[in-house]
Amino acid sequence: MRLRRWILLASTTVGLCLAVPVHAAGTLDKIKALQAIALGYRETSIPFSYTGDDNQPWGYSVDLCTRVAAAIVKQLGMEELQLQWVAVTPENRIAKLRSGEIDLECGSTTSSLARMQEVDFSLPTFVDGAAYLSRRTAGIKRLEDLAGRKIAVAAGTTTERTIAQVLKQYKLDAQLVKVSDHQQGIAAMVREQVDAYASDRSLLIGLALDSGNQNDWSLGPETFSYEPYALMMRRNDADFRLAVNRELARLSRSREIYGIYDRWFGFLAKPGPRLESVYQLNALPE
């Protein structure tokens, strides 16, 4: 039994999806017919989902999706399953999922009621919250210091809405600058075009560590939201959702999930109380 990690052009993936219309059959039927599963990943959502130095997808969520794919191989009695990795952004991830270009999104997406109008989600995979990162030289040490500043935020994210609400709540006159992804936000700070970048706390830590100049950055002490991450899939496909959740539950029951966590976050800290609760609640019995 082999798993092959293939990175394909989006056009190739679309062509494959058209061969077996996603709406004509369930996702598991499509996967079995094509002997392939299309997985969406983020290029810069370190350490959840990103492109490594070898041009391959890496990260906590990528590891979870690889485990799910292996479980599907076993469930369907297949000898081989091609993993087709397709890059997505906050702005196009839902559209690519609904169109059938990807079957499962392996990123850093918050499961929200508003999004559930368009897509379905797996069991929670992580818990995070919105925060902000700034250059240490900017002197931003608390929320009030953001007054009169420019704050970058990725368009199409829950943080975009959250940070706008926080600024309004605390009556802070700051300008929000929309960017396409995390790297663009960091680059805007480096060029001093903005004073801070708002995103989920774990992502900001990953970006600071990846910069190679950790001492140049300051992470705000506040956390502004509850962001339960989950793997995203098409709506109303109970069989596929069950297959995904069955593996996530097994990882929690066997405690293998802690090994995956340690690989990507162990150098920072052990899972906090909220994430511990998620892992415990995910350990559903067969």
Image (cartoon, grey):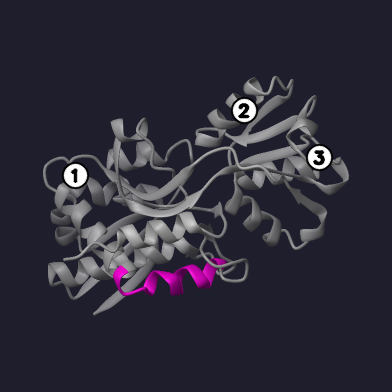
Q: Which structural element holds mark 2?
A: helix
Q: Which residues are magenta?
A: 253-265
Reading the image, the residue beneath label 2 is 166
Few, some or many C-alpha atoms within 10 Å of disc 1 (few <14, some 14-19, many ≥20)? Answer: many
17 or 230, nearer to the observer: 230
Residue 88: give x, y in percent of width and height.
45, 46
Q: Are marks 3 and 1 in contact (CB under 8 Å)?
A: no
Please say if 230 is above or below 132: below
Q: Which structural element holds mark 3?
A: loop
Whether residue 157 is visible, yes or no, is: no
29 or 106, nearer to the observer: 106
- Badge 3 amino acid: Ile
Reading the image, the residue beneath label 3 is 140
261 within the magenta span: yes
| Image quadrant in which you'd find residue 81 | bottom left
- Mark 3 → mark 2, Cα distance in angstroms: 16 Å
Residue 68: give x, y in percent of width and height.
29, 64
- Badge 1 amino acid: Val
Reading the image, the residue beneath label 1 is 22
- Mark 1 → mark 2, Cα distance in angstroms: 40 Å
Q: Residue at x 18, y 76 (%)?
A: 79
